[in-house]
Amino acid sequence: MIPEDPQLPNEQDDEEALRLENDILKLKMQAEFGAQFDEIAKDVSPELEQQFLKQVYDFEKAWEKQEITTVSKLLGNPNFIPINAIAAADLDSEYQKVLDLYEEKGMSVDFTNEYPTSVKYRFATEELPLHETMLVNMPGMMLGFIYEEFHPNHASDMEEKVKTFLEGWFDRDIEKCTGIVSKQFILDNGQLLPQESFKVKLQQLFDSYNAFEETDYFISETSYEKQEADAEGDELALGYVEGGMRWKAVLENGETLPVSGPFKFYLELGYGDCSIMYFVLPGWKW
């Protein structure tokens, strides 16, 4: 008869003790911060769970003591060189020095789209330093600032939505396509089509083919018009993205059907995001 491992009961006891500590820590966080926790996956060890819980607890405690300050103060109130005093050949290197300072102070400046270095430099040295932010004194925490959060690029956002839809279309990916359309689609006759109904119609079309091959598209024009801001001050806009696309639809018998033509997507922007509310595509009929 094989003797039992004398360490096993101790290991089990240690694991149960850790789980009990984790449960007590959860209760403490619920009482102090109103925290809510989903059920932890069974394959997550109690050690890893405790590490996560302690990180969350430390963050919540630091968040309680947050202060309102300016980016300039966090940077040490530096005197940046005015852009007009920088030679064009030196602008890139001076801008890198600015980024290095931000990183040294635990901050980052990012741009989703491409801009001239002059625009980046002005933002990082003239506009952003005046911005008020919350100081959370927590070691290792980085503050990130994204240019587009200060200056929304609606054209770029709309194009990204259209690109995502077209990629989903060519992959015949229902979720990818429906995830960026409005909850109420507008039909040719002005009626509204619920998102779920649109999803069914799209599935029926995709099921008619085995695959889409030799896919390609281009965007020729993007335009939008700002509307009045809503009650909460969020910027509203309506716009369109148009271009052309082509692909070959593979039929069940293996034959291919070439499809090509112009497309036009109409989008609405609100609450910090945009969605597709109507489109005209080759091969699609409402």
Image (tube, rainbow, N blue to C red):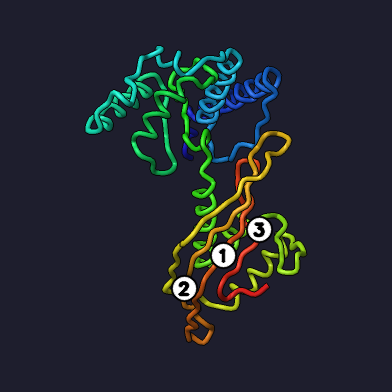
Q: Quadrant of the C terminus?
A: bottom right
Q: Does 114 sit above or below residue 286?
A: above
Q: Secondary structure at mark 1?
A: strand
Q: Which residue is mark 2?
A: 246
Cα gap from disc 1 to disc 2, whole angstroms = 14 Å
- Contact? badges 1 and 2 (CB < 8 Å): no
Q: Position of residue 148 (x, y in %)?
A: 49, 38
Circle 2 SS class? strand
Mark sitting earlier along the chain (1/3): 1
Amino acid type indicated by mark 3? Met
The one nearer the camera, 172 or 284, is 284
Residue under label 1, please give it: 264
Q: Is residue 38 above or below residue 23?
A: below
What is the three-letter code of the residue carrying label 1? Lys
In-image side of 54 versus 77 (left or right): right
Where is residue 164 drawn, in percent x and y?
A: 51, 57
Q: First in sequence: mark 2 or mark 3?
A: 2
Residue type beneath disc 2:
Arg
Q: Residue at x 69, y 67 (%)?
A: 200
Tell me if residue 102 comes above or below residue 40 in the rendering. Answer: above
Report the disc number at residue 277: 3
Q: Residues within 10 Å of mark 2 (few under 14, many from 20)?
A: many
Question: Is residue 185 among what the camera can see?
Answer: yes
- In terms of sequence position, does the residue under pointer 1 or pointer 2 come before the other? 2
In the rendered image, residue 75, in percent from the top left (x then y), is placed at 41, 16
Give the x, y percent position of residue 278.
Answer: 65, 62
**Is the residue under label 3 in contact with that under label 2 (CB below 8 Å)?**
no
Distance between the alpha carbons at the discs numbered 1 and 3:
11 Å
